[in-house]
DNA sequence: AGCTCGACCTGCACGC
DNA sequence: TGCGTGCAGGTCGAGC
């Protein structure tokens, strides 16, 4: 499900309720998601206060008062729902399964795998039908070497990320631009939607070899545009609270409205929205995943 | 070494 | 209605 903007949105939502508060208890409905929960997960979280939040790639890091970090990844279908008493206080839904879990009663649906009880009567429920999510508990000093984080590349909003950085990493790369941008060891946090959208904005074909933008000396200036557009599309999406796919009506109307501004993603057969282009959006498959682009204006 | 693919898992939309 | 197929915002390890 979530790419960088959605993860950022979820983190900010968790922050509102969790920051400075203690975890009273944790209930696990099963022993694993994509990976097993760490040993004594619930026990080790009991009584801990959350001191700060941080996002790295598509991971959320919650720093605890004992020098440990609670690490989350939402996989494809993970989401948090925040409740206070019986009433849903804040909806962090981004996957469109809330109605189902609500209908199950008591906020305990079939795919509610973790419940965090927070001081002040808050409950945070983690729901993840496909169970591609991950949770781990890591000592602060070990976080950089954590196997899930060690190989992660540049943050799109960080100083390292630039046209020169892309040029350096794309040199002699045969993989299509689409695959290169999805590679988390190069760029952290981009996923299928925002790669498609950024490439459309930059006027670059997802099929072009990544290395084709690098010259013997320097690089194609369109790498500058690409960097700019990646940052712009991510910023706008964060601003919009991320994208909500296959969703039901949202009661709050606040979170996740960027999907209304997709230029190409999931728009096969529709006209290219670029002014004066007149092309038609195409869907192709690259490394087993859908790519949407306009063959007319993306070269 | 670099790249693509299958596997992980469930739900939903589609066509017959 | 039911069944089969293909698709879904991610990631990792196997295999070429």
Image (cartoon, coloured by chain):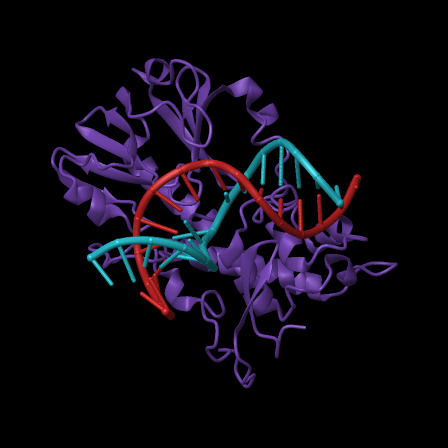
Chain colours: A purple, B red, C cyan
Residue A137 place in picture, x, y as percent = 45, 21
Q: Residue at x 56, y 31 (%)?
A: A148
Question: Against A91, is A25 above or below?
Answer: above
Residue at the far left in the pictured view: A86
Q: Is residue A42 above or below residue A126?
A: above
* Residue at far right of view: A216
The residue drawn where x is 22% and y is 37% is A109
Q: Is residue A279 above or below residue A151?
A: below
Say left or right for A181 vs A8.
Answer: right
Residue A196 position, x and y percent, is 55, 62
User: A183 or C5: which is nearer to us?
Assistant: C5
Location of residue A286 in the rendering, given as x and y in whole percent from the top left corner = 61, 58
Looking at the rendered image, the quarter that the C terminus of chain A falls into is: bottom right
Q: Is residue A178 left or right of residue A42?
A: right
- Res. A280 in view: yes
Q: How many marks overall?
A: 0
Q: Nearer the viewer, residue A22 or B13?
A: B13
Identity of the residue drawn at 76% across and 64% down: A220
Side of A211 relative to A155 (left or right): right
Q: Position of residue A186 (x, y in %)?
A: 66, 45
Q: Residue at x 37, y 67 (%)?
A: A260
Residue A22 visible? The answer is no
Looking at this view, is A295 or B14 the one in front?
Answer: B14
Q: Quadrant of residue A158?
A: top right
């Amino acid at each position: 499900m979530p790419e960088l903007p959605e993860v950022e949105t979820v983190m900010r939502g968790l922050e509102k309720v969790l920051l400075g508060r203690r975890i009273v208890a944790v209930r696990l409905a099963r022993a694993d998601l994509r990976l097993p929960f760490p040993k004594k997960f619930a026990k080790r979280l009991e009584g801990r206060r959350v001191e700060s939040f941080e996002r790295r790639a598509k991971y959320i890091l919650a720093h605890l008062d004992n020098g440990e970090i609670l690490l989350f990844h939402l996989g494809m279908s993970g989401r948090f729902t925040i409740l206070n008493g019986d009433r849903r206080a804040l909806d962090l839904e981004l996957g469109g399964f809330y109605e189902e879990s609500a209908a199950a009663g008591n906020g305990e649906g079939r795919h509610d795998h973790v419940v965090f009880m927070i001081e002040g009567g808050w409950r945070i429920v983690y729901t993840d039908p496909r169970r591609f999510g991950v949770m781990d508990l890591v000592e602060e000093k070990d976080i950089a070497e954590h196997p899930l984080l060690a190989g992660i590349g540049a943050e799109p909003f960080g100083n390292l990320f630039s046209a020169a950085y892309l040029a350096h990493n794309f040199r002699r790369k045969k993989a299509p631009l689409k695959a290169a941008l999805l590679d988390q060891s190069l760029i952290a946090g981009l996923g299928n939607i925002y790669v498609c959208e950024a490439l459309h904005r930059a006027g670059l074909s997802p099929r072009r070899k990544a290395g084709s933008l690098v010259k013997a000396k320097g690089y194609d200036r369109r790498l500058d545009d690409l960097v700019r557009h990646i940052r712009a599309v991510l910023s706008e999406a964060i601003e919009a609270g991320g994208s909500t796919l296959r969703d039901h009506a949202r009661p709050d109307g606040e979170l996740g409205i960027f999907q209304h501004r997709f230029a190409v993603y999931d728009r096969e057969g529709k006209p290219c929205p670029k002014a004066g282009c007149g092309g038609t959006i195409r869907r192709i498959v690259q490394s087993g995943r859908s790519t949407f682009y306009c063959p007319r204006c993306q070269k």
